[in-house]
Image (cartoon, grey):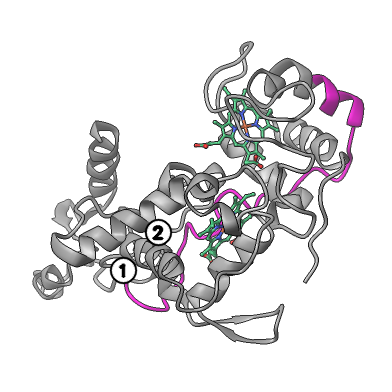
Amino acid sequence: MANLTEKISMLALSAVIVAAGVTAIVNFTDTTHQSAAATPPSGLQTETAPSAENLVFSPPKKIPKGKLGKEILRGEQIFNQTFSTVPQFVGDKLNCSSCHLDGGMDESALPLVGASTQFPEYSKRPKSFITLSERVNQCFQRSEGGKALPLGNPDLIAVDTYITWLSSDLPMYEKIPWEKNGADLTPSSTINLKDGEMIFQQVCSTCHGMQGQGGFGPPLWGPESFVKGAGMSKLKDMASFVKLNMPVYEVHGVKPGGLTIQQATDVAAYVLKHPRNVFHT
Ligand code: HEC
Ligand code: HEC
């Protein structure tokens, strides 16, 4: 929590705009402050509108009291302990938070802060608009190797409520600058599987097991991992995720984010060449 507070005060600092020797503080998250900033002394240039570039990554800190709070907490529990809480809908040993780290609140690991503001959303898969529930079900079917929950299922509604709470105070249908973080780096165009294998053995196996079977970290291949057809089974997505987020702490001199994009590509390709279940509709 201390970390989060520090992060937020740093972000607030970066919102200090120095113009013509005068310092104006613009609070991008609180719209009531904008009218004050909109009437600067003449000749002074300040930024006012909360456009996409200046949306601030700031996950909510307070869970509301009462029924809504209970529903959010239930959703959070399912999100963080998915396969033990709703085993009937999960086919692997992954939690939502195995990939959407820190309950979807880690800015570099597929963050879900802001995600609900984009739904209903056009989806290329069914070529139509889908709801947040339907998007969550895509991750249940592929990333969790499981089954779609019936629409209206109380557990699905709880997960939706938690994800919606993550977007508290964010405007609807604005572009979310951090939306694709952890899935959008360009992998290297050349792949060296031997190097990938070496990195896997020296670094990844410490937590994910020599056979990718899992340990301190979740399984990376085999029947207990996500299925072929999941986002993470694409080289781009896994290489990006690994580059920004793995290892979760320093192992053999490699710090989190310490691999090069080449190394992240090589090790992702090595992981992905192993067998895993295939998605069937
Ligand atoms: C194996 C990793 C993995 C697991 C486990 C996983 N997801 Fe995802 N999820 C992804 C990836 C990759 C994306 C696509 C990111 C992108 O390209 O925007 C994604 C996207 C999403 C999105 C859409 C985000 C957006 O901005 O449009 C939602 C919502 C979501 N996941 C919810 C969940 C929920 C709920 C669970 C658990 C039931 C879950 N995910 C489990 C990897 C995973
Ligand atoms: C220090 C332990 C540690 C090391 C080393 C480590 N990981 Fe992880 N990894 C984790 C943990 C823990 C998670 C899940 C995070 C959570 O549950 O909060 C994870 C999650 C993942 C995920 C997403 C979930 C899944 O199972 O698909 C991938 C992919 C991944 N790691 C790949 C790698 C690769 C590749 C390496 C080597 C470069 C690596 N990790 C090194 C601990 C580690």
Name of the residue lying farthest toward the bottom? 128
Q: Earlier in the sequence, mark 1 or mark 2?
A: 2
Q: Secondary structure at mark 2?
A: loop
Which of the pair 196/186 is nearer the observer? Answer: 196
Image location (x, y in percent) of residue 112: 45, 58
Residue at horizontal 40 percent and vertical 70 percent from the top: 154
- Give the Cα distance between marks 1 and 2: 9 Å
Amino acid type, mark 1: Leu
Which of the pair 148/111 is nearer the observer? Answer: 148
Q: In this picture, is 44 found above or below 258? A: below
Residue at horizontal 80 percent and vertical 55 percent from the top: 228
Q: Which mark is residue 170?
A: 1
Residue at horizontal 47 percent and vertical 45 percent from the top: 81
Residue 240 makes an appearance in the image: yes
Residue at horizontal 51 percent and vertical 45 percent from the top: 84
Image location (x, y in percent) of residue 115: 45, 66
Image location (x, y in percent) of residue 41: 8, 69
248 to the left or right of 159: right
Are circles 1 and 2 on residues that touch, CB within 8 Å?
Answer: yes
Read off the residue under disc 2.
Answer: 113
Q: Which residues are magenta?
A: 170-198
Residue 104 makes an appearance in the image: no
Q: Is residue 192 magenta?
A: yes
Q: Please tell me whether the stretch drawn in magenta is mainly helix, strand or loop.
A: loop
Which of the pair 199/125 is nearer the observer? Answer: 125
Under 8 Å from ligand 1: the CB of mark 2?
A: no
